[in-house]
Image (tube, coloured by chain):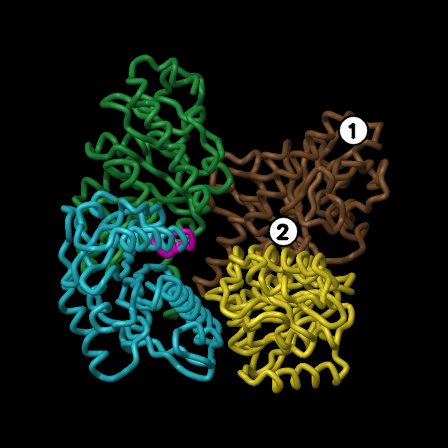
Chain colours: A cyan, B yellow, C brown, D green
Amino acid sequence: MQSLRNSGTCDATRLAACARAIADAGRKLGAQGLTPATSSNFSMRIDAEHAAITISGRDKGLLTPDDIMVIDMSGRAIGTSSRPSAETLLHTQIYARFPHAQAVLHTHSRTQTVASRLFAEQGMIRLAGYELLKAIAGHTTHDTRIDVPVFPNTQDMPELVGRVDAWIASGQPLYGYLIDGHGIYTWGRDMAEAERHIEAFEFLLGCELDLRRLRT
Amino acid sequence: MQSLRNSGTCDATRLAACARAIADAGRKLGAQGLTPATSSNFSMRIDAEHAAITISGRDKGLLTPDDIMVIDMSGRAIGTSSRPSAETLLHTQIYARFPHAQAVLHTHSRTQTVASRLFAEQGMIRLAGYELLKAIAGHTTHDTRIDVPVFPNTQDMPELVGRVDAWIASGQPLYGYLIDGHGIYTWGRDMAEAERHIEAFEFLLGCELDLRRLRT
Amino acid sequence: MQSLRNSGTCDATRLAACARAIADAGRKLGAQGLTPATSSNFSMRIDAEHAAITISGRDKGLLTPDDIMVIDMSGRAIGTSSRPSAETLLHTQIYARFPHAQAVLHTHSRTQTVASRLFAEQGMIRLAGYELLKAIAGHTTHDTRIDVPVFPNTQDMPELVGRVDAWIASGQPLYGYLIDGHGIYTWGRDMAEAERHIEAFEFLLGCELDLRRLRT
Amino acid sequence: MQSLRNSGTCDATRLAACARAIADAGRKLGAQGLTPATSSNFSMRIDAEHAAITISGRDKGLLTPDDIMVIDMSGRAIGTSSRPSAETLLHTQIYARFPHAQAVLHTHSRTQTVASRLFAEQGMIRLAGYELLKAIAGHTTHDTRIDVPVFPNTQDMPELVGRVDAWIASGQPLYGYLIDGHGIYTWGRDMAEAERHIEAFEFLLGCELDLRRLRT
């Protein structure tokens, strides 16, 4: 965790706790097959100006605190020459737009990838009538719906940031989003809530695919 | 297991054994992917007037005795300020209607959710011709059938209790039931039998979905 | 392993080795999900007159030597009041018909059950063109075929024994068979070969189901 | 690792490191279900003239250094009477044609087998538009495509070697290939890259099968 020693501007105890929580989440999500082939990236807010995030290219199921680095809220590496995830700006955007968000998880399961490609053309997946919608913060009944947008994939992060902002600006609620041919982003008030959101979306997308196979 | 210390009205040894059995069952069912995103709830009958049940919102794959509390048979928390599962009345109903039932398990797998949605309109799933029907207590041949009702989902527990009672009142046997967009409830003479019933229903519902995919 | 102590008629060392091999195989097959809800049964030939077999009703993924008992070659329990598997006669038949067989495995996976129901009407599944056919003893090329019969299910074991004998009498080779709505039986020159056969059949039946879904 | 002691012509430290890396990779790939029934084989380049490769017929999920042997670059066993994998020439071909390749992995998953059979007639599978294409060395965007050839299966290794050479001679890039009814071959600059390639191809082939099921 060399990068962490050099990042004197943030609280060492909080930083170490974030790094541990990220590594633990990675192990769990990796064991569930959600992070194939060094894909996926995870972060936590350290304080108003910093976040801890996974270093690019590591196996996300085998993370140790040494695989976590510090960035500022514009996505610049702090106190390290390591390179943060290529998608760092999507993390800092969430921290900027959602003040309650303390953890952001991006995974890349087969279900997420397939669902994103199937629904890319219509631009979103509507989830409705599932008891497990109650696992998404703020929902107390199955008798509701959550629309998960599917944004076109691009290697141009500012373009993606713009699409997420446009969705938010439209006034539609946002609990997570898919990128076409890629995976999901979701977040929470703490790591436990972010993990619950990942588990719930993975489950619900899987049900949608199964029902589509079975109803035709 | 603070709640357990304060519940002087029931036998401490029996209570501790129930809490251990519930936590062990949760670990097994969680490892099989049947309890996503803090869903599911489990209970055991302690004595004629009390049951042990999982506290609301806990990760059911990581239960310890501290995640178990005591309720009376009308579903009220005993000796604790913790909140029992929102579906507590479905557990106490089983203990009231089936005197032999000592353990009730509710899980929430993708197979269960998908099967419940597919068969909701016809109100039940008929399972017939499977050797594994012999895993459901009282069955000694594959040459039989078990009808599993699918009740509409609601957040109104007395309404659900009423639907279960109506099925029982109709004279049809009941070994477990699904709730639409949700999961399954089943039970047994002890925790081992309840677990065997969950495993068998999960297996049989999965076969039904596969056959439906393959036969069209 | 009480039953084993009382079975003075067979070699204690060989018996203990068989019991260990059966328990180990059960753990592996159980972890792969092939033995749901106390289904499945396993045996090994001890000597010309005895076999070790799983006691009825045990969880096959959690076997210890205490869950194994001795039978003679007509399927009678030796030195114990435990009840052997209801399908014991299918095991002793294999030892009688195939002198090289030292281990018999019967599992009950979802793939096996679904395949058996789909192909029950045509009475067999033809496996051809797979490299993994080379995992079945005596095959050195993928350019071959293996016919796996599917027999109707019955609780009458002599009837099933008769169907297996009729297949053998017809001169067709037999490496394993399915029972409709049930699972598979296969065997080997030792436990390792029997396990390899189970793994290969499970894989090949899964491929057949996938191809059927994908080709229509 | 008896064979390794007798193979005085190559560096013992490098050899031991290769054997460990191969055994570790086997455990990981076996746990993911990619190596059923003693199928699959793995190798690493030791030096310009030698490679370490799995001995034929071993359980690839339970490899120890004793299951690894040394071959020369024409596929002959060195310092041992063990028999190398029947497909050894496919490994040495990769080392000869791709000087950067240090590790070659051949696995045999259900997804790989089913995909190979489905696409055998058209001779290749085109993977395009997936973010995970970036996991294949040399790719920095999802906006690309990789063609994976599917060669007819044969037990005649020189024939297969010829087909691979013909593809290379045609000038098309080659990152891995499937054999019909069989599995995949891929490789990397080190074992970590080869493993990442296996994981990525397994994922991408699985997505292609799912989309085919869902789009019809």
Q: Could you tell me residue A212's position as x and y percent?
A: 43, 73
Name which of mark 1 and mark 2 comes first in the sequence: 2
Subunit under mark 2 = C
Mark in front: 1 vs 2: 2
Task: Quote the CA–CA distance across marks 1 and 2.
Answer: 28 Å
Q: Is residue A34 magenta?
A: yes
User: What mark, if any, has residue C203 been given in the picture?
Assistant: none
Q: Is residue D107 left or right of residue B14?
A: left
Q: Secondary structure at mark 2?
A: loop
Magenta region: which residues? A29-35
Asked whether the viewer can see residue A166, the reply is yes
Instruction: Please tell me which residue is depicted at 43% across the width and 70% down the height of the picture.
Output: A204
Q: Secondary structure at mark 1?
A: loop
Q: Could you tell me residue A2's position as x and y percent?
A: 22, 43
Disc 2 target residue: C35
User: What mark, if any, has residue C48 been given in the picture?
Assistant: 1
> Mark 1 near mark 2, Cβ–Cβ under 8 Å?
no
Image quadrant in which the N terminus of chain C is located: top right
Q: Could you tell me residue D142's position as x and y percent?
A: 21, 58
Inspect the image, locate mark 1, and give the three-letter code of the amino acid beneath it. Ala
Inspect the image, locate mark 2, and give the three-letter code of the amino acid beneath it. Thr
How many C-alpha atoms fall within 10 Å of the one at disc 1: few (<14), some, or many (≥20)?
few
Instruction: Please tell me which residue is depicted at 40% across the width and 54% down the height of the picture.
Output: A33
Q: Nearer the viewer, residue C139 or A5?
A: A5
Asked whether the viewer can see residue D126, the reply is no
In the rendered image of this protein, does residue A106 appear above or below residue C193? below
The answer to which quarter of the image holds residue D35 is top left
Q: Could you tell me residue D43's position as x and y percent?
A: 34, 31
Image quadrant in which the C terminus of chain C is located: bottom left
Q: Is residue A82 magenta?
A: no
Q: Is residue A122 left or right of residue C25?
A: left
Q: Nearer the viewer, residue D41 or B16?
A: B16
